[in-house]
Amino acid sequence: MYGLSAKATLGPAETIRLARLAEDLGYRSWWCGEHVVLPSPRVPESPMASEDPILDPLVHLTFVAAVTARIELATGVVILPQRNPLVLAKQAASLDVLSGGRLLLGVAGGYLEPELTALGVPLAERGGRTDEYLDAMRALWNDPAPVAFAGRHVSFRDVDAHPRPTTPGGPRVVVGGHSPAAFRRAVARGHGWFGTGSSPDVLAGHLRGLAEAARRVERPAHLGPLEINFMQVDPVEVTAADARRYADLGVTRLALYPLPLEDADDVARFLERHARVLVSRS
């Protein structure tokens, strides 16, 4: 059930140490987020300062895949409309193959206008692009050759891409976000949903939004039950009582977020402390 957000790791030695420790302690998943560029100077809506380092999530997870054997590798999240969907489909399939099917591809439409604009994506188009790019990637992962897709933002025909993912149907897709549109997208297109918040009460509110979306849009049967992935932030310490409440709410994966810790020793102690309280009881 429990996972770790990997934003606090940067160097190779620290990453190897902490990823292997998390796996040995019984954590189930390793999560990392994305910002390609950040506004400079920082704007109020930016989650981090422009000089804060953040690795490309697929590069980072490929490194983690090479030094671990079991832990799931999750993007939380890739800002999908900023990506070329054909390139991302190839990257995701490659990582899925190299990791033995351990990739969870978390995606979202994004919200940081300066970043989207710098990458050539109008803010108003981010939702439509996200939906279309997901459909295009699934076509490349699953459709018989020659593969074709026709959309407003991406079109191709008479192509193919191998290797196909190890995971049948392609990597499991997790849709992030807290808006009604994100909830509908998770229900209609995702194996799971990913959200953040400060408590089980916040999650309960998001679950009401997902339930409302499920009344409005049809969920394809092949996606199965919607998995609930949640990362508690501010506070980062998760109590045993809160963990039980998250379990009662149906959380599939609860991700821990050990910021503002920057020292690897502090992060290791955070992992060990939470493993004693949480992982041993899951």
Image (cartoon, grey):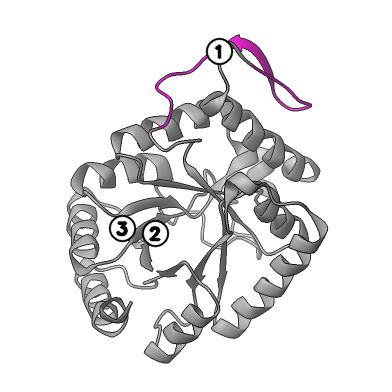
Give the number of the disc on residue 9.
3
Comparing 163 with 38, the one in front is 163
- Mark 3 vs mark 1, foreground winner is 1
Residue 84 in sight from this viewpoint:
no
Q: Quadrant of the N terminus?
A: bottom left
Residues in magenta?
148-165
Which is nearer the eye, 198 or 163? 163
Q: Amino acid at mark 1?
A: Ala
- What residue is at 44 percent from the left and 35 percent from the top? 92
Position of residue 110 measured from the top left corner of the image (x, y, whole percent): 65, 51
Give me the residue at 70% from left, 66% from top.
Answer: 210
Q: Secondary structure at mark 3?
A: loop
Asked whether residue 163 is drawn in magenta, I would say yes
Mark sitting earlier along the chain (1/2): 2
The residue tagged 2 is: 7
Q: What SS does tag 1 mark?
A: loop
Figure check: 43 above or below 267: above
Residue shown at 58% from the left, 58% from the top: 225
**CB contact under 8 Å: marks 3 and 2:** yes
Question: Mark 3: which amino acid?
Answer: Thr
